[in-house]
Image (spheres, rainbow, N blue to C red):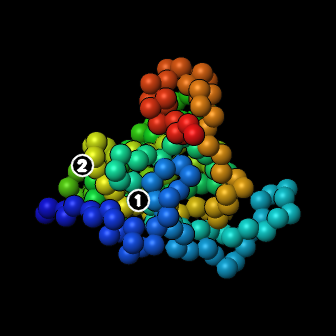
Amino acid sequence: MQIPRIDSRELIDRLKLEPHPEGGYFRETYRANSGVTRKGEDNLRAASTAIYFLLCDGAYSAWHRIRSDEVWHFYAGDSIDVHVLHSNGELLTHRLGNALEDPQAAFQAIVNAGDWFAAECHEPGGAALVGCTVAPGFEFSEFELAAPGALGARYPRHRQLIERLEPKRL
């Protein structure tokens, strides 16, 4: 079974995707009406959120972290690598893609709350449409982009990968 190539411009228009601060394009598709609070906090937040996320044209998801668990889902296109840096310095790379065609790929990948992570198309020039579900729900106020050079200094063993996927300097 051959997967058709993604027409990135068509998907951006059809799905009404917008540029994401970490790279790529996104659109929130779901925000739960029910709310939850974190233990020890008073602010009510959505129990869960979901987005479409498109990587194309050499874009990548730069190193960032959030305060909630995030589940990545593969929808279409090429495989992507979701790199996760645990606080103990361990690097884990999930191959997210069509698990029916690629035995090294999985349809879902999990990033635990607080872990630094980045994502890129496995093959240069690739394009992939994925989804991300966050629980408790995503809030931009809890989104943290890595400061250039900071993660490489903290995890020198992975410096080359970290520097390649750092946020773009403006």
| Mark 2, secondary structure of its residue | loop
Mark carried by residue 54: 1
Q: Tell me the residue at 65%/51% (across/down).
A: 143
In the rendered image of this protein, does residue 130 appear above or below residue 82?
Answer: below
Residue 17 as seen in the image, left or right of residue 129? right
Q: Is residue 31 left or right of residue 18?
A: right
Query: CA gap, disc 2 to disc 1?
Result: 22 Å
Residue 163 percent across, percent down from the top left: 49, 29
Do the residues under discs 2 and 1 have CB atoms within 8 angstroms? no
* Quadrant (top left, top right, bottom left, bottom right) of the N terminus: bottom left
Is 137 positioned to the left or the right of 60 in the image? Answer: right
Residue at the location (86% across, 63% down)? 42
Q: Earlier in the sequence, mark 2 or mark 1?
A: 1
Identify the residue shown where x is 31% and y is 54%. 127
Labels 2, 1: front one: 1
Instruction: Locate residue 141, reporting x and y percent.
Output: 72, 55
User: Any mark on residue 103, and which?
Assistant: 2
Q: Residue furthest bottom?
A: 33
Count every numbered label the image shows and give the total.
2
Q: Is residue 115 visible?
A: no
Residue that appears at 27% across and 62% down? 6
Q: Is residue 55 visible?
A: yes
Q: Give amino acid for label 2.
A: Pro
Image spot of residue 79 (x, y percent): 30, 51
